[in-house]
Image (tube, rainbow, N blue to C red):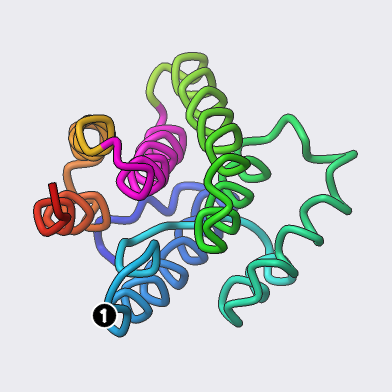
Amino acid sequence: MKNLHTGGARTSVRAIFSTACTALALATAAQADDGPARYHMSVVGENRELSFFTAGDYAGAIEFLEGERHGRSGKFSYYNNLCVAQTMLQQFAAAAANCDAAVERADRSMKLSMGGHSDRLDYATALSNRGVLRAHSSDLAGAESDFEEAIGLRAHYLGAYRNRQRLGDEPA
């Protein structure tokens, strides 16, 4: 935990939730033989929203997010979390648009904040999540590029390192 920035309430809460979901994703990946669950994906949000992910209720997460869309449709977390839920359900076509939107919003936010810590973490998260989707869409070069860029943004982001390592285990 010493590498987490705790400068503000928003950042520390996001970091704690992201860390909790990271641990869950890694535990799930360790038990899975194939499919998206063997990779690490991260979600960010509030307790109610995250409860769907921790329970493995990805369809419920999508339903919740779609119900909340009117107030959140422009936000990184909305698109990022849809990307994760749809990838986990292997709804790859729908996930692709949301993964790209999460990357776009996180990139824009990072540029506006001139590389602030939480914005760099969001961008690295979005890239790594999109890399998982690309790996399952047989775009191994695109997946590797996303994982490498995520690592470049957040050198201590173990999820991206693990994803890159798992990518090497994919059949060519």
- 171 sits left or right of 17 in the view: left
The residue at 68%/44% (across/down) is 78
Q: Residue at x 18, y 35 (%)?
A: 148
The local secondary structure at tag 1 comes to: helix
Q: Quadrant of the N terminus?
A: bottom left
Is 73 drawn above or below residue 8 in the view shown?
Answer: above
Give the main secondary structure of the magenta stretch.
Answer: helix
Query: Bounds of the magenta span?
Result: 116-139
Left or right of 69: which side holds 60? Answer: left
Estimate the x, y position of residue 104 in percent, counting from the top left: 52, 23
- Residue 7 colored in magenta in the image: no
Q: Pointer 1: what residue?
A: 30
Q: Position of residue 121 (x, y in %)?
A: 39, 41
Residue at 51% from the left image edge and 49% from the top image edge: 11
Of residue 58 and residue 49, the one placed in the foreground of this image is 58
Q: Is residue 130 magenta?
A: yes
Rendered location of residue 98, percent (x, y): 60, 37
The answer to which of 90 and 101 lies nearer the viewer is 90
